[in-house]
Amino acid sequence: MSEQVFPTRLAGALRWLSIGGTLLMVLVIAIAAQHVTGPWWFRSLVLGGPSVVLLVCVLGWPRGYVLSRDGLHVQRLFGRTRIAQRIDSAAADDDAFKGAWRVFANGGVFGCVGWFRSRRLGPFRAWVTDLSALVVVRHAAGCAVISPLDRAAFLAAVSGHNR
C-alpha cells in the first residue's frame, strides 16, 4: 500500500484564534522590547516566553494526516508523529469535543493539539484544525481525534486499509 495523504485546513474559530493569538504575542513582544527594563535575564524571559510559545504552536500545527502500511501519522511542519500503528475503527463525530477538557494541550492557536479527556471518549489525543470536520480514530493504545479536509475520503481509505 502506498502512502495516502489527507490535508487539513485551519478553519472556523481555530483560524480566528490563531490569527488573534499570533497578533497578541507579536504585540506583547513588541511592547516588551520597548518598555521592559531590568536585568538581562528578566528581559530575556519576558521577550523569550511569548516567542517560544508561538514557535511551539507553529511547530505542532497539524498540516495533514498520512495513512501508510506503518499506520496513521500526523504531518507537521517538520516531520511526522505516529498516531496509531493499526486503526481499529474510525468514524465521523462532530461532537467529539463536546464536554472535553484539556489535560495538557494547546486549545486553539494553530489547532487543538494535545491530551484531552471527556466522559464519552475518555482520555484522548487530538490533532485538530477544523472543529466542524472531526473524526474519532480508535486504536490499540486508545483514542485520537483528527480533522482531515475530506472526511469521506479518509474514512473510505481507512475502511480499505483495514481489510
Image: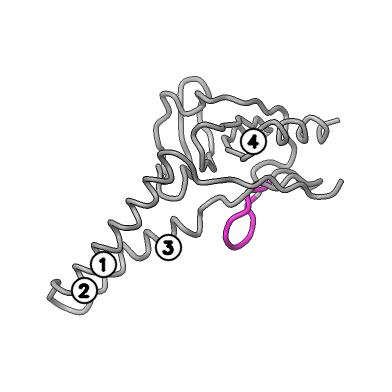
Say whether disc 2 or disc 4 marks the residue closer to the N-terminus: 2
Residue farthest along the bottom direction in this orientation: 40
Image coordinates for residue 72, horizontal then vertical, percent? 70, 43
Instruction: Tell me the SS state at disc 2.
Output: helix
The structure residue drawn at horizontal position 63% and vertical position 53%, both measured from the top left corner, is 75
**Answer yes or no: do the residues labelled 2 and 1 have beta carbons within 8 Å?**
yes
Say whether disc 2 or disc 3 marks the residue closer to the N-terminus: 2
Query: Which residue type carries mark 4?
Result: Ala
Whole-Å distance between the Cαs marked 3 and 1?
13 Å
Q: Residue 33 got which mark?
A: 2
Say whether disc 3 or disc 4 marks the residue closer to the N-terminus: 3
Q: Along the horizontal axis of the image, is 109 left or right of 151?
A: left
Query: Which residue type carries mark 2?
Result: Ala
Q: Nearer the viewer, residue 54 or 88?
A: 54
The quadrant the C terminus occupies is: top right
- Look at mark 3 in the image and give the residue it sits on: 55
Say whether disc 3 or disc 1 marks the residue closer to the N-terminus: 1
- Look at mark 4 in the image and give the residue it sits on: 141
Image coordinates for residue 133, horizontal then vertical, percent? 56, 32
Instruction: Tell me the SS state at disc 4.
Output: loop
Which stretch is magenta?
73-81
- Look at mark 1 in the image and give the residue it sits on: 29
Say whether disc 4 or disc 1 marks the residue closer to the N-terminus: 1
76 in the magenta segment: yes
Q: Which of the 4 image quadrants contains residue 145?
A: top right
Instruction: Tell me the SS state at disc 3.
Output: helix
Camera-side mark, 3 or 4: 3
Instruction: Tell me the SS state at disc 1.
Output: helix
